[in-house]
Each structure stands twice: as structure tokens, then as C-alpha cells.
Image: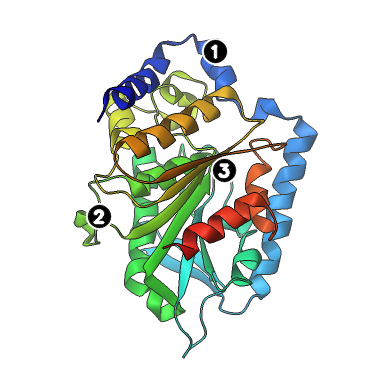
Amino acid sequence: MNGQAASLLEALRAEAGLARARLDGDYNARASVSPARFEREMQRYRALSEPARAMQGTALDLVYDEESGQSLDIFGAAAPGERLRPVFLFIHGGYWRALSKADSAFMAPMLGRHDIATAVLDYRLAPAVSLAEIVREVRAAVAFLWRRGANFGIDPQRIYVGGSSAGGHLTGAVLADGWQERLALPPQVIKGALPISGLFHLAPIARSFVQEWIQLSPEDVVALSPAEHLPRAGCPIVVAFAAGEPDGFGRQSRAYHTLWQASGSVSSLVEVPDRNHFDVVLDLADDDSALSHTLRSLIAGG
């Protein structure tokens, strides 16, 4: 790690020392939009996800982890006899305590029109389970797609992952080093990633209002922060965030992008204009949006 990267990582750690009011403001996405706007975007998540259920190549409620009983849905996979398709695994946000796969398939029709499958998953939510358990479940979903994806028309050699907000953090947790061997997966099981509005270091989160339900110990902060576990040979990624984000999300996205590059891997940084924390990800439902083009280019280049 070069000097710039080391300084960035230390700055992320040091955010824990900022005043509580500052941290709450910098990481309170709900406060960045009106209550009516927030409710409208949540309704759009569900409404734009519904059409995916009518797609060809759909398989619903596939249990990916026997221990937790959690399941995922697949949309737009190859039909029998067709060439297996790459898959984009989308991990929903909700500050680890809200939303579900039913709200998360809005990009599937767009990707399906370009012969790319989509997988969306449920994971158990805080505070009923720990963040460490949530991370374990999401990694188990990756293992399921790698081992069994071909049975459902998915190419296990072309798994891409992305997520928004807390899902951006969980995307980083999947990209991190050190867990793949335990699940007998290749180190580069992920071929590319699109974290959107992600949280890549948890030090400030553990000092903010989010600690009320996420309950991170100092050991959790180190173990579960993607910025602390960059892979030695990472896949290409695109780090995206909205121009209308609270400041903390933008800082973390810029820092993670720079850290990824400093580790010797390829990263692009995209700031999406005229979008907020909640509607930026919905650009993935639009074939013609810059974010959709970026995702398709990432997958085409893999």
C-alpha cells in the first residue's frame, strides 16, 4: 500500500473521532430527502421489480443457505440448450435492517434484454442477526451461484455483483480477501462489481445512530470493513454514488475507489448527477441511463 492509500485508510478509521452530530448528518440518508420522496422511491423499488417475475428464465425462492433458510430469485437465465448467461447478483440496501429481494429486481428486465441474468437475494436483517451473519449469508449466495448456477442457466465463470448503500458494503464484503477458500471457491470467483453509495469502513458507522441496531464491536469494525481487506488481485469495479448523497457516502466511495486502484486493481469512479441516495440505483431500470451502460460494459468486458 502506498503512502496515499495508507493516509486514506487512516482517515476512514479516524472518522470515528468526529462529533456524533456530524456523523449522524453525514450518514443519515433518510434525512437527505423528504418523507414523501422516500416513500415514493420505496414504492418504485417494488413496482419496478414486479415485471421481472414474468420474464423467461425465472426461478424463484431457491434456498441458497441451509443454515439460515434464506433464498434468492433468478431472472433472465438461459433456456436449456442455450449458452449459459452471465449473472448480476444484486444485494439490496436498507441499512442492514430493511427491504428484501421483492424490492430489488428492477434491473432484471433491462439486463435480460442484453442476455444477462439477474439474481436477487434475501438475507436476515439486523438486529435479529449480527452483521457478521449477514455477511456470511451473502457470501453463501455467491457460493450457491458458483456451484449450482449452471443448473439454472447461469455461467459460474461470469458472476458479477453489486448493491446499493448497505448492499454496497456487502458487495465490498464479497470482494474482500480471505473467505473464498473456506467455501472452496476460486479467489477470483467474482469477475466485476458495481457498489453504489456503499459503506466501506464501519468505524464512523459504529459511532453513529446506526449503532443502535447494528451493534458493532471494535473487532467487528476491523473484520467487516471492506477497506481493511482489499484483495491482492481484485476484479474490475465501478464505484458509483449520487451527487445528492449525504457527505459520508461520497467520501467513502471516493476513498474505496482510490484504495482499489492503489492495490493494483482497476476501478472507475462515477458520480451520478441529479440523483439522491435512494433513486440513483433505479437508473439500472433504464436501458439508456449512464449507470446501465456502465454495468453492461463492465459485464461485456469480463
Residues 53 and 232: in front is 232
Element type at mark 2: loop
Identify residue for label 2.
180
Looking at the image, which residue is at 56% across and 75% down? 58
Q: Distance of mark 3 from mark 1, alpha carbons?
A: 24 Å
Q: Distance of mark 1 from mark 2, alpha carbons?
A: 37 Å
Residues 105 and 294: in front is 294
Marker count (numbered): 3
Circles 1 and 2: CB atoms closer than 8 Å: no
Q: Mark 3 vs mark 1: which is more N-terminal?
A: 1
Point out the frontmost of discs 3 and 2. 2
Element type at mark 1: helix
For residue 191, side relative to residue 213 (left or right): left
Q: How is the image coloured?
A: rainbow
Looking at the image, which residue is at 46% across and 79% down? 153
Residues 128 and 26: in front is 26
Q: Among all residues in the image, which is located at the extreme top?
A: 19
Where 20 falls versus 188 (above or below)? Answer: above
Identify residue for label 1.
22
Residues 60 and 234: in front is 234
Q: Indicate which disc residue 98 carries.
A: 3
- Res 288 quadrant in image: bottom right
